[in-house]
Amino acid sequence: MHVIVDLCVVPLGVGVSVSAHVAECQRLIENSGLHHRMHAYGTNIEGPWDEVMAVVKSCHEGVHAMGAPRITTTMKMGTRTDREQHMDDKVESVESLRRL
């Protein structure tokens, strides 16, 4: 099953700046080969369900390995069975209507 997720991983107990932890998570997502796009408060990731969930787990493992004793994660996800849809399709659909 194809899934699109919006993932926000927040390490706790590591101080005010979390950019190094976010960068590690981004490296892991990049290395997964999945289509993704970082934004100001998280990352959109799309692909096969098991691969996407595996990279979410990998992010937790990587951030814990950096010394974060706790992590809180927010994730929104969507799937469709009526047709294939990708992140770029969703954005283009709205942008095309905005131009009218």
Image: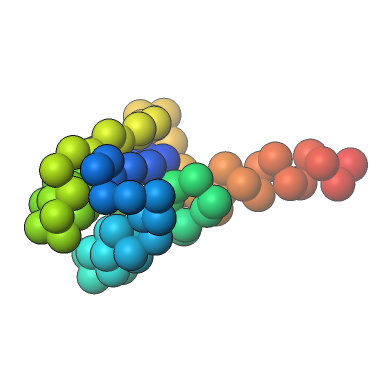
| Whether residue 74 is situated above or below residue 60 in the rendered picture | above
The answer to whether one can see residue 62 in this image is no
Residue lying at the far right in this picture: please name it.
100
The answer to whether one can see residue 93 in this image is yes
Q: Quadrant of residue 11?
A: top left
| Whether residue 70 is situated above or below residue 62 in the rendered picture | above
Tell which of 45 and 73 is nearer to you: 73
Residue 40 position, x and y percent, is: 54, 51
Tell which of 52 and 96 is nearer to you: 52
* Residue at position x 16%, y 60% in the image: 66
Tell which of 51 and 85 is nearer to you: 51
| Whether residue 39 is situated above or below residue 100 in the rendered picture | below
Residue 93 position, x and y percent, is: 66, 42
Q: Quadrant of residue 94?
A: top right
Residue 34 position, x and y percent, is: 30, 61
Residue lying at the far front in this picture: please name it.
15
> How many marks on residues?
0
* Residue at position x 46%, y 58% in the image: 37
* Residue at position x 79%, y 39% in the image: 97
Q: Pick the quarter of the image with the N terminus.
A: top left
* Residue at position x 40%, y 55% in the image: 17
Q: Pick the quarter of the image with the C terminus.
A: top right
**Render colour scheme:** rainbow
| 49 lies left or right of 9 | left
| 40 lies left or right of 18 | right
